[in-house]
Amino acid sequence: MKNGNMKVRNPILLVLTALIWGVAFVAQQQGGEMLGPYSFNGIRSLLGGLVLLPVLAVMRRKGEKEKSNRRELLIGGCLCGFFLFAGSTVQQLGLYYGAGVGKAGFLTAFYIILVPMLGIFIKRKCGFHIWAAVLLALVGFYFLCVNGDFVLKGADLLLLACALLFAIHILVIDYFSPRVNGVAMSCIQFFVCGILSLIPMMTENGEGLRLLLVSQEAWIPVLYGGIMSCGVAYTLQIVGQKGVNPTVASLLLSLESVFSVLAGWILLGEALKGRELLGCGLIFIAIILAQLPIKIDKRYI
């Protein structure tokens, strides 16, 4: 009976995770505009790490055993934190320089396609459906981002760089997660990301921090980004993925891109044109195609 409840509950938790991350694009856009992209990213990351500290305390109280030594945990957490800092910083800059919430969500979702492509370098073989997904996604990217004179906006290129960095981030997590406590590694990565963000924050002359002291409105996107997007959503992902087929989990989490478009439409009034909607649709189909469990004769080359 318990397993039956998990089969129903855990996919719902993954959809909820995707919803939280999708809506987070609105918080990121507004928070970046008010505080500056570096200040928002740094503050929400540190807040996300603080939120996970009580979770770790509860886990230890329940007697959960550590999976690794501290050296592995520290290395994994620092590497994840660096790539999280790089990816989220580039993403914030893309939003800051004019990319819409919906477009940002879909272009960020390119990491789902880039992960198996990068896997070639660690001798993972890609099936034909992966390359078909890449081609379809490129067509979708054309309709979504390329205007009549074939000029890409700088913000679009930043978001593609963000997708690449997040793909590397996922591969690093894939390597360390079986060896370490996932929540502990996530906590470390958020603190590393926050600390690294302090360096570029200095270029913003402390305006974001001063705004937080005088404006309650500025705290709304920061609290959502730190507590909901970092702390809550990551914990839901860990719980939700237990007992769920990884392919199914990836498909459910890829709904983040759909929720980002809906959030931009409902909360910000961002209406995408027909051409852009076509591009979004093609990219999302490509994401699904890339995750299909098509068997190949040999997994490694």
Image: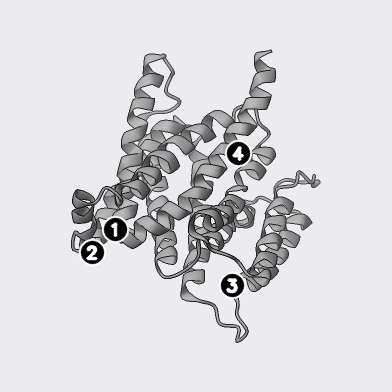
SS at mark 1 in the image: helix
Q: Left or right: 113 with respect to 297?
A: left
For disc 4, the marked residue is: 15
For disc 3, the marked residue is: 145
For disc 1, the marked residue is: 35
- At a point 64% along the width and 22% down the height, the residue shown is 6
- At a point 79% along the width and 47% down the height, the residue shown is 296
Q: Earlier in the sequence, mark 3 or mark 2?
A: 3
Q: Is residue 153 visible?
A: yes
SS at mark 4 in the image: helix
Residue 103 horizontal/vertical position (percent): 55, 63
Residue 44 horizontal/vertical position (percent): 34, 47
Residue 145 position by quadrant: bottom right
Give the class, few, some or many, for how many residues have Cα within 10 Å of label 3's Cα (few <14, many ≥20): many
Question: Image height check: is 219 above or below 273?
Answer: above
Q: Left or right: 64 with respect to 291?
A: left
